[in-house]
Image: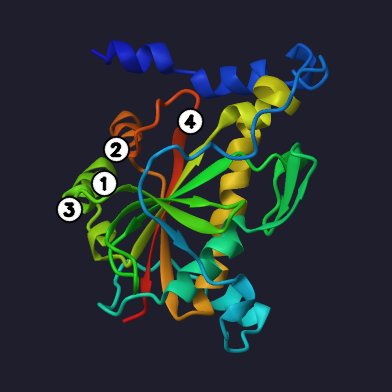
Amino acid sequence: MSNPVTRSLRGAGREFMRRTEYGNLPPSDQMLGRPSPPLEVPYTKEKATVVLPAPGSIALPALDLHDAIERRVSTRDYASEPLALSELAYLLWSTQGVKRAVGGVFTLRTVPSAGARHAFETYLLVNRVEGVTPGLYRYLALEHRLAEESRDPDLPRQIAAGCLNQPHIIKSAVTFLWAAVPARMTWRYGERGYRYLHLDAGHVCQNLYLAALGVGCGVCAIAAFDDAAMNRLLDIDGDEQFLIYVATVGKMP
């Protein structure tokens, strides 16, 4: 006998696509003249922050784009060598760097996003980065700095377990955890915006793969995780903010 939960979910993907067709959508909040959500989730915790080196301050070896695309693979084995703080800053800038904020309504960044909505918050599980205490951090893209979330020493094990026990999370120098803030996207596009969140996640992670090669790192994207468990670990509610994609990073062995 089939699982009743499985039966109830059958066709959910097709139903989502049908119900988010343009012809089925009511006016968006933008169309109704409502104010746009904040460009970044405010950081209110009284904990340490880390000022990051300017993106242009890192000297990178010349890397041909064709060569980078040709060499791009998922890498799960990493050397014990830590990342330099400037290298982490470069990867953060490459994936969510803000080039310009326009009127508090939208930002222009280093990756494409539907309507320049840029609906992600970047969390980092830091294991080995020079000058940064291991723990969980959030990238404050508008200020280009890291904000501490937790120094729980058990977090690497818990996050690996939440990602269905994938061991390269513990071996990584840094694990990127991208959380979506759907209101930033649905303000313009309504429920169809949920489609665009997943498209944007692909843009961000591909930039990470290509940029990582320039600093001698490998990357492995992860989409298999326990949603509820991971949202709890990030201290987000799973509704107004939820984990959408994960990627490990480490120096090539």
Image quarter for residue 31? top right
Proximity of marks 1 and 2: CB atoms separated by less than 8 Å: yes
Closer to the eye: label 3 or 4: 3
**Which residue corresponds to mark 1?**
159
- Foreground label between 1 and 2: 2
Amino acid on which the number 3 mark rests in the picture: Pro
Q: Gap between marks 1 and 2, in whole Å?
A: 7 Å
Element assignment for label 2 = helix
Label 3 or label 2, whichever comes before in sequence order: 3
Q: Amino acid at mark 4?
A: Gln
Determine which quarter of the picture holds residue 238.
top left
Eyeballing the image, is 192 above or below 197?
above
Q: Determine the CA span between mark 3 and mark 4.
A: 24 Å
Q: Which label's residue is closer to the chain start, 3 or 4?
A: 3
Q: Residues within 10 Å of mark 2 (few under 14, many from 20)?
A: some
Q: Is residue 241 above or below residue 163?
A: above
Mark 1 and mark 3 lie on one chain; the one further toward the N terminus is: 3
Q: Closest to the observer: 171 or 183? A: 183
Residue 38 lies left or right of residue 249; in this view the side is: right
> Counting other residues with Cα less than 10 Å from the Cα at mark 3, is it few (<14), some (14-19), or many (20 or more)?
few
Q: Which residue is mark 2?
A: 233
- Residue occupied by mark 3: 153
* Residue 193 makes an appearance in the image: no
Q: State the residue at coordinates (50%, 19%).
A: 12
